[in-house]
């Protein structure tokens, strides 16, 4: 039986990945830290505790276990926080785990990155071949995702790693973007848009099931070696429609009134939220969130579809 180590297995994306691979007959060991999602607890997967901020604890993952593949999902994912924390969790730990994987003869190290490595500006359906990393990013979250991807490319043979770059992940017990957006709708009498797009820019949704299927392809397909794939659902959803669909599901009967303001009107509040927040934003929007909602994040998902089809799966479509 094929054995997989999945880091971040107690979290939202990680617990979905554990459930996905367990259902397909893989033997899964999940690296967990503190909070553990019920989905992971119910999966039947083996659990090992370790901490991205304690590199020595990562050694224990391989002390008494061998794995065919490592799927590295664990990360510090936030709009805000101390740069050093991001460096440790999202760069130093990646290097250490990748080194451990190679020393322990893992067939492939699959790294969950982010589409934010391309930057937060307007896009119009570019493919991975046309996209480049945005080295001008100032937020430490994409900064160290970029550094990690570059380190993997420089230090591992191409066939030994692949990268998966999801857009905004939702679905199956989402504890991140959906609650945050619903809280905004509850607290605001209006749906505010900022800048030229007026809510008609693409909101780049990636269902967590499609993230899992792309991870599966990244793990097994020869053509995925040394490559990265953007995960983006084929359904085109603009920002206005996204909020309206959320309101219809979670706040039925709420009247949605939309207002567009110049971007500069919200910048002082965004700066304050970014400057004085810890690893959880004080309120929305932060500068990072503002850049996300005011740009057209429209990428090609052709490589994602090719990888999903390559493992004899189809793109998951939310009913």
Image (tube, rainbow, N blue to C red):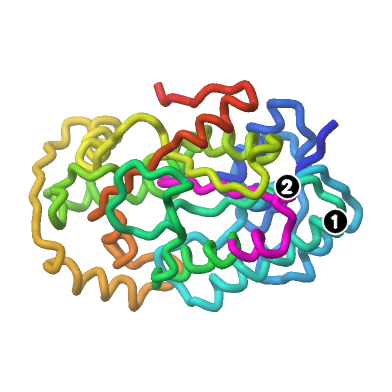
Along the polypeptide, which appears first: circle 2 or circle 1? 1
Would you say residue 234 is visible in this rendering? yes
Q: In this view, does 25 lie above or below 8?
A: above
C-alpha gap between disc 2 and disc 1: 21 Å
- Front-most of residues 123 and 165: 123
Residue 199 shown left or right of residue 215 in the figure: left
| Residue drawn 29% across the image and 31% down it | 249
Q: Where is residue 160 in the image (x, y as percent from the top left)?
A: 74, 50
Q: What stretch is highlighted in magenta?
A: 150-168
Q: Where is residue 258 in the image (x, y as percent from the top left)?
A: 10, 45
Q: Quadrant of residue 152?
A: bottom right
In the picture, the quarter occupied by the C terminus is top left
Q: Position of residue 301 (x, y in %)?
A: 44, 36
Neighbor class of circle 2 (other Cα within 10 Å; few <14, some 14-19, many 20+) is: some
What is the total number of numbered labels drawn onto the structure image? 2
SS category of the residue bearing label 2? helix
Q: Is residue 211 above or below residue 148?
A: above
Task: Check the image and name the residue furthest to the front.
Answer: 130
Residue 206 shown left or right of residue 164 in the figure: left
| Residue drawn 40% across the image and 39% down it | 300
Residue under label 1, please give it.
62
Q: Which mark is residue 159?
A: 2
In the picture, the quarter occupied by the N terminus is top right
Magenta span contains residue 259: no
Neighbor class of circle 1 (other Cα within 10 Å; few <14, some 14-19, many 20+) is: some
Task: Check the image and name the residue furthest to the right.
Answer: 64
| Residue drawn 88% across the image and 50% down it | 65
Would you say residue 171 is visible in this rendering? no
């Amino acid at each position: 039986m094929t054995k997989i180590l999945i880091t971040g297995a107690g979290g939202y994306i990680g617990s979905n990945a554990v459930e996905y691979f367990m259902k397909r007959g893989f033997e899964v060991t999940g690296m967990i830290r503190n909070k553990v999602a019920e989905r992971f607890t119910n999966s039947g997967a083996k659990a090992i505790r370790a901490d991205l901020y304690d590199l020595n604890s990562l050694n224990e993952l391989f002390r008494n276990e061998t794995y065919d593949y490592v799927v590295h999902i664990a990360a510090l994912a936030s709009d805000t926080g101390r740069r050093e924390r991001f460096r440790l969790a999202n760069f130093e730990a990646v290097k250490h785990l990748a080194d451990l994987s190679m020393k322990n003869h893992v067939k492939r190290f699959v790294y969950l990155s982010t589409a934010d490595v391309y930057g937060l500006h307007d896009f119009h359906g570019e493919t991975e071949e046309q996209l480049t990393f945005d080295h001008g990013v100032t937020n430490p979250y994409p900064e160290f995702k970029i550094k990690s991807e570059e380190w993997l490319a420089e230090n591992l043979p191409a066939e030994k790693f692949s990268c998966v770059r999801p857009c905004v992940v939702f679905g199956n017990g989402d504890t991140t973007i959906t609650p945050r957006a619903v809280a905004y709708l509850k607290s605001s009498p209006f749906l505010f848009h900022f800048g030229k797009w007026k809510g008609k820019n693409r909101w780049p949704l990636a269902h967590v099931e499609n993230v899992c299927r792309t991870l599966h392809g990244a793990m097994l397909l020869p053509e995925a070696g040394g490559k990265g794939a953007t995960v983006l659902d084929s359904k085109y959803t603009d920002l206005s429609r996204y909020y309206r669909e959320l309101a219809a599901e979670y706040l039925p009967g709420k009247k949605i009134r939309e207002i567009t303001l110049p971007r500069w009107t919200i910048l002082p509040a965004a700066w304050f939220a970014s400057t004085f927040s810890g690893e959880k934003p004080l309120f929305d929007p932060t500068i990072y969130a503002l850049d996300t909602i005011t740009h057209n994040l429209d990428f090609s998902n052709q490589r994602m579809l090719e990888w999903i089809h390559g493992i004899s799966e189809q793109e998951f479509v939310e009913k």
